[in-house]
Image (cartoon, rainbow, N blue to C red):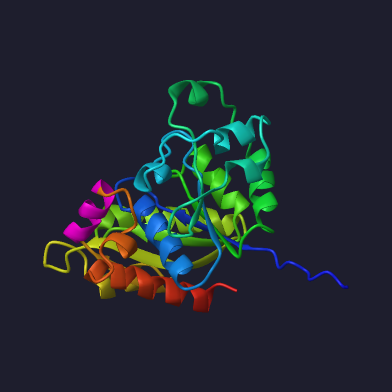
Amino acid sequence: MKRKKIKAARVIAIVSGKGGVGKTVTTVNLAASLNLQGKDVIAVDGNLSTPHLALHLGAPIVPVNLHDVLRGKNEPAEAIYEHHSGTKLMPGSIVLKDLYNLKIEHEEFARVIDDLRTKAEIIIIDSAPGLTSEAIMTIKACDDIIIVMTPNLFSVSEALKTIKIAKNFGKNIKGIVVTRARLDDNELKIENIRNLIDEPILGVIQEDDAIRASIMEKDAVVHSHPESQVAHSYMNLAKRILRVVR
């Protein structure tokens, strides 16, 4: 019998020019939303210095993590865990000594990501914030980039820098996700952001107390509060991304 060829996963990096914009929340909920829509997804914590992805899903300490894999102690498959929802996760280590003992090699991280391409349909990497070496490492390892930003001029400025650097590496910018939006007069209008950043706006995620509650419950908001407005926004974002990422 002829063996079925496995299609390599598309790798999407979730990046932001600055911290505090909701990048990890977006990674968690995008991965969970894609999984709810029938996709086999692995979320990878590419923020090696301050990994928070597993904290959002209630698994801060695991037997084998991404840091172990990068040090050559374990194979990538050993660091993949499945959330009760079916979403898969490759967490980093929150132990301080693991940060001290880790020499970040961009090529090794890219090798780990390439190894995952046959283990899921979509790989989503939660990047380190800003434009540090860790963030560049994630940009270099991915196929497509989604920029997360808040509706203010500081975030616009950093997003523009991030887009330029990503394009210099030949990466596809799939669009912008505007998060923590209140849609009031104290922030940039979405149309103004669209004019300032010549990239598609994939979704607008409004500030919502359901997000804070989901973090306390250590779950994605699409699981903990599926009827909330923000959950619907993330589900719609996932549908949009499935249309633009091939």
| Residue 39 % position (x, y) | 53, 69
Please, is residue 9 above or below residue 107 in the view? below
Residue under the image location 49 percent in, 26 percent down:
99
| Residue 204 % position (x, y) | 30, 69
Which of 241/61 is in front? 61
Residue under the image location 57 percent in, 46 percent down:
80
Magenta residue check for 212: yes
Residue under the image location 78 percent in, 69 percent down:
5
Residue under the image location 37 percent in, 75 percent down:
236
Which of 208/185 is in front? 208
Residue 202 shows in the view:
no
Q: Tell me which corner region of the image, top left, top right, bottom left or bottom right, holds residue 102.
A: top right
Quadrant placement of the N terminus: bottom right
Q: Residue furthest bottom?
A: 243
Which of 97/131 is in front? 97
Please, is residue 240 above or below residue 137 in the view? below
Residue interval drawn in magenta: 208-216
